[in-house]
Structures are given as C-alpha cells and as structure tokens.
Amino acid sequence: MIIVSYDISDDKLRTKFSKFLKRFGRMLQYSVYEINNSKRILDIVMVEIHDRFEPKFSQSDSVMIFQLSESCEITRFGYAKNEEYDMIIIT
C-alpha cells in the first residue's frame, strides 16, 4: 500500500493528477490518496508520476509517497475511524 500526498499549484494539472490517482485508489482527504494494490500497479503509479507529471511540476509543487509495510500501524481519529477495515497482507 502507498499513501500519496500532493500540493500542486496549477489547477488543471492538480485536477489531472487527482483523476489519475482515482483510477488506482481512493481519496482519504483532499490531496491525499490511498492506493492498495499489487506491486505491478504500484510500480505503474510510481513510473507515471515520475515520467508524466513530474516534468510539469513547478518549483513549488510537491508529491510525497509513503510506502507502508506490513509492520505499519495506522491510528485513526474522528470520522476516519469509520473508514477502518481489516487488511491482510500476503507476501
């Protein structure tokens, strides 16, 4: 699983980036997506961001990708507690 957080200043590019991420995962908060899929899909997402979007970023734009492992713990507060679900990781 990866968590993608982004801050993109250009409205059109930000919209395209958000639509791109929606194809693979779900929005957790504005500009934060969770992608829980196969290694192949995760690799595709990483390459697409690097090759397709990064060349268009301005100096103020940023994307952070957090790669979560089986030992990661997620603690939720507020409404996010309702989104909690069991996750099984098979390696």
Image (cartoon, rainbow, N blue to C red):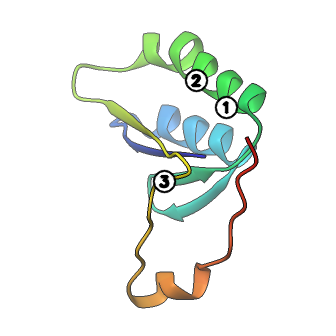
Q: Amino acid at mark 1?
A: Leu
The span from disc 3 to disc 2 (Cα, nearest Å) is 22 Å
> In which quarter of the view is residue 9 placed?
top left
Residue located beneath label 1 in the image: 42
Relative to the observer, which residue lies in front, 39 or 4?
Answer: 39
On the image, the x and y values in percent for residue 6 come to 39, 42
Question: Of callouts 3 and 2, which one flags the residue occurring earlier in the amino acid sequence?
Answer: 2
Q: Amino acid at mark 3?
A: Ser
The span from disc 3 to disc 1 (Cα, nearest Å) is 18 Å
Residue located beneath label 3 in the image: 71
> Mark 3 and 2 residues: CB-CB less than 8 Å, in contact?
no
Depth check, mark 3 against mark 2: the one in front is 3
> In which quarter of the view is residue 42 placed?
top right
Residue that appears at 66% across and 23% down = 43
Q: Residues within 10 Å of mark 3 (few under 14, many from 20)?
A: few
Determine whether, in the image, residue 7 is placed left or right of residue 48. left
On the image, the x and y values in percent for residue 32 come to 46, 54
Determine whether, in the image, residue 9 is placed left or right of residue 2. left
On the image, the x and y values in percent for residue 11 come to 44, 40
The span from disc 2 to disc 1 (Cα, nearest Å) is 6 Å
* Mark 1 element type: helix
Residue that appears at 58% across and 44% down = 18
Determine whether, in the image, residue 54 is placed left or right of residue 27. left
Residue located beneath label 2 in the image: 46
> Mark 2 and 1 residues: CB-CB less than 8 Å, in contact?
yes
Q: Amino acid at mark 2?
A: Met
Q: Residues within 10 Å of mark 2 (few under 14, many from 20)?
A: few
